[in-house]
Image (tube, rainbow, N blue to C red):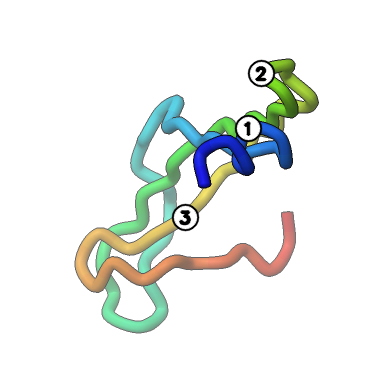
Amino acid sequence: MGAARVLCGAEEERVVSTHKAPGACPRCGGAVVATDVESERRILCLPLCLKSKRKYSCTRCLRRLVTLYS
């Protein structure tokens, strides 16, 4: 199974930073936290692409939040 992941292009994610975001959770009213994540796709141990994403989540109910307009 491990060899197949190396050949097919496994994706690795790592958290770059976490900080408080403005606003509140629409479900429970808890604080929102923004997490910057870098994902790297590799094929045969060679880096193919690097993507940066920002994910939002609630600290109280742990619900993942999606931005409507970015």
Could you tell me residue 18's position as x and y percent? 37, 35
Q: Label 1, label 2: how many angstroms apart (C-alpha)?
A: 7 Å
Mark 1 or mark 3, which has the lower sequence index? 1
Q: Quadrant of residue 29?
A: bottom left
Figure quadrant of the C terminus: bottom right
Q: Residues within 10 Å of mark 2 (few under 14, many from 20)?
A: few
Mark 2 or mark 3, which has the lower sequence index? 2
The mark lying in front, picked from 1 and 3, is 1
Could you tell me residue 55's position as x and y percent? 51, 50
The residue that label 2 is drawn on is 45
The residue that label 1 is drawn on is 6
Residue drawn at point x = 33 percent, y = 63 percent: 58
The residue that label 3 is drawn on is 56
Residue drawn at point x = 48 percent, y = 67 percent: 65
Identify the element where label 2 is drawn.
loop
Residue drawn at point x = 63 percent, y = 32 percent: 6
Q: Quadrant of residue 50?
A: top right
Toward the left, the furthest residue is 60
Q: Nearer the viewer, residue 1 or 16?
A: 1
Residue drawn at point x = 43 percent, y = 51 percent: 22
Instruction: Verify CB contact (< 8 Å) between mark 1 and mark 2.
Output: yes
Could you tell me residue 16's position as x and y percent? 45, 26
Q: Is residue 22 left or right of residue 47?
A: left
Q: Residues within 10 Å of mark 1 (few under 14, many from 20)?
A: some
